[in-house]
Amino acid sequence: MHALRQFAAHAAVASSMASSALALPSSSSSSSAVTADAACNATLTLTWPGWPGIKYAFIFGDSYTQTGFNYTSPSPPTQDNPLGNPKYPGWTSSNGPNWVDYLTVKYNASRLQTYNLAYGGATVDSDIVKPYMPTVLSVKDQVHSQFLPGYTSHGNSDLDTSSVHPSAPDAPAWQGNNSVFAVWIGINDIGNSFWLNNVTDINTKIFAVYADLVGLLYNAGARNFVFLTVPPVDRSPMMLADTPEARASEKMDIATFNGLVRQLADSLKDEHGDNANVWVVDTQVPFNAVLDNVAAYPQTANLKNTTSYCEAYQHGGLKPDSFNATCGVPVNEYFWLNSLHPTYPIHDVVAEEISKALVAGPNVCGTTSTGTATGTGTTTTSTTTSTSTSTSGGMGSMGGM
Ligand SMILES: *[C@@H]1O[C@H](CO)[C@@H](O)[C@H](O)[C@H]1NC(C)=O
Ligand SMILES: *[C@@H]1O[C@H](CO)[C@@H](O)[C@H](O)[C@H]1NC(C)=O
Ligand SMILES: *[C@@H]1O[C@H](CO)[C@@H](O)[C@H](O)[C@H]1NC(C)=O
Ligand SMILES: *[C@@H]1O[C@H](CO)[C@@H](O)[C@H](O)[C@H]1NC(C)=O
Ligand SMILES: *[C@@H]1O[C@H](CO)[C@@H](O)[C@H](O)[C@H]1NC(C)=O
Ligand SMILES: *[C@@H]1O[C@H](CO)[C@@H](O)[C@H](O)[C@H]1NC(C)=O
Ligand SMILES: *[C@@H]1O[C@H](CO)[C@@H](O)[C@H](O)[C@H]1NC(C)=O
C-alpha cells in the first residue's frame, strides 16, 4: 500500500508566525501568541527535569510518526529495547528510522523509553476528517483507546476510573516530571479537507477536539508537551503534480492550521502556567531549508533529488542505501520516498531540532507572559471529551505506509 492518499500538504508562510519556533534561544521577546520564544525562563518549572531527566516519551501522530508499535504486545519498551516492538526501526514511512527512532536512540540524553501510538493515515478525529480507511486510529483513538486505558488508571476518559490498572504490559510508572508528550498531526486533516469550502469550520472543530485531547493528557498527569507543526507537503511530489492553485490553497491551509497549533500551545500554557512546559517545533523550517538547499544540514547534504520520487523505491522496505539503476541514485539520496513521505535523512534533522528545543527549554510562553499559574493546581479544563464513541476496533491494518 503506498503513499497515504490522505496526505495533504501545506506550507506555511504566514507572515507573523514566522518560525523562530524551531528552538534555540533567539532574542525574540515578544509575547505574541504566535511567537515561540526560546527559553521562557520564567516558565521553567519543577515539572521539567531537563532533557536528560526525561525517562518516558509518549507519541501521537500519523504515518510520518508511526513505527508500528503495538501497545498490547508482550514486548513493551525496556531499557535495552527502548521502542519495544516491532524490531527497530519499526514500520516507518521513511525506508529507515523516523524522527521518533532518532529521538529515542540518537538524540536521547537518557535511557529513554518511547511509547509510540501514532498510526498511519491518522487525522485528529475521524468523525471530523475521515481517514483513507475506517480502521485508521485517529489521535482521538490513540488517546482514548490506547493511552488512557494502556498507561493510566483511567478507562477511556479522565472521568472514568473503572479501570484501575494501566492495561499495557509493563506499563511504566511514569510521572509528569519525567515524561514528555509529543504530537505531530495535521497532514491528513489538511490533505482531506483543504479543498472544501467549509475548511474554516472544519479547523474549528478539529482544534476543539485537539484541545480536549491535550486536556485529557494533562488531567492524566502529562506536564511536558511538544507540538510539531505540519511540514510543507505542498512541496511534495503529489502536490507538485497538482495545479498551482491547489498547491497555493493547501499551503494556505497549512499556514492556518499551524497558526492554530501555536494558539493551542499558547492556550495550554496560559491555562496551566507553571504546571505545564510547552514547546512548538516548527517542521517547516528544516523541511524548507533542505528543500531549498540540501547542504543546510549535514544529515541531508548527500541528497540529490528533492522534487520527485522513484517508482522502484516508493514502497520502501529496502536497504537504507538501496540502489536501482532506473532511479539514477540510491534511495537515500532522494528527499522523497514516494509522493508524500520523505526518506529518513530529514527525520534525523527533525529529531535533532526537537532535542535542541528540549535542551534549550520551553519555547511557548503563553500570551500572558508571566508564566505564573493562573489558578491552576487542580485540573479542570476543557477536558471531557465529547466523544465516548471513538471508533475503536482494534488495530486493524497499519494503514498507509
Ligand atoms: C534566560 O536566562 C538566560 C540566563 O539567565 C538569559 O541569558 C536569557 O536572556 C534569558 N532568556 C529570556 C528569553 O529571558
Ligand atoms: C497486538 O498484540 C496483541 C498481543 O500479542 C495481539 O493480540 C494483537 O493481535 C496485536 N495487534 C496487532 C494489530 O498486531
Ligand atoms: C541513548 O539510547 C541508546 C539506545 O538505548 C543508549 O545506548 C544510550 O546510552 C542512550 N544515551 C544516553 C545518554 O543515555
Ligand atoms: C516528581 O513528581 C513526583 C510525584 O508527583 C514527586 O514525588 C517527585 O519528587 C518529583 N521529582 C522531582 C525530581 O521533582
Ligand atoms: C464540510 O463540508 C463537507 C462536504 O460538504 C461536509 O460533509 C462536512 O460535514 C462539513 N463539515 C463541517 C465541519 O461543516
Ligand atoms: C529526480 O528523480 C526523478 C525520478 O527518478 C527523475 O525523473 C528526475 O530527473 C530527477 N531529478 C533530478 C534533478 O535529478
Ligand atoms: C529496478 O526497478 C525496476 C523498475 O521498477 C524493476 O523492474 C527492477 O526489478 C528493479 N531492479 C531490482 C534489482 O530491484
Image: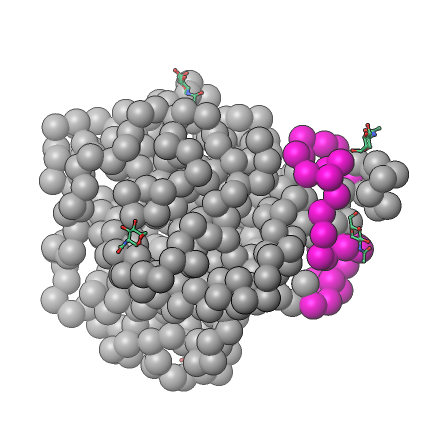
Q: Residue at x 34, y 81 (%)?
A: 31
Q: Is residue 15 left or right of residue 211?
A: right
Q: Is the residue 219 above or below the residue 89 in the image?
A: below
Query: What colour scheme has been applied to the protein in the rendered image?
Result: one colour
Q: Residue at x 49, y 62 (%)?
A: 250
Task: Residue 401: tell me if it is visible.
Answer: yes
Q: Quadrant of the C terminus?
A: top right
Q: Which residues are magenta?
A: 292-321
Q: Is the residue 75 above or below the residue 143 in the image?
A: above
Q: x, y percentage for residue 298?
A: 73, 59
Q: Quadrant of the N terminus?
A: top right
Q: x, y percentage for residue 233?
A: 56, 57
Q: Is the residue 40 above or below the residue 91 in the image?
A: below
Q: Residue at x 47, y 38 (%)?
A: 120
Q: Residue at x 72, y 57 (%)?
A: 306
Rendering quarter of residue 148: top left
- Please identify the dominant SS of the magenta region: loop
Q: x, y percentage for residue 129?
A: 34, 47
Magenta span includes 313: yes
Task: Residue 361: tell me if it is visible.
Answer: no
Magenta span includes 326: no
Q: Is residue 125 left or right of residue 2?
A: left
How many discs appear? 0
Q: Is residue 133 left or right of residue 160?
A: right
Along the line of sight, which residue is nearer the eye, 312 or 56?
312
Q: x, y percentage for residue 151?
A: 29, 34
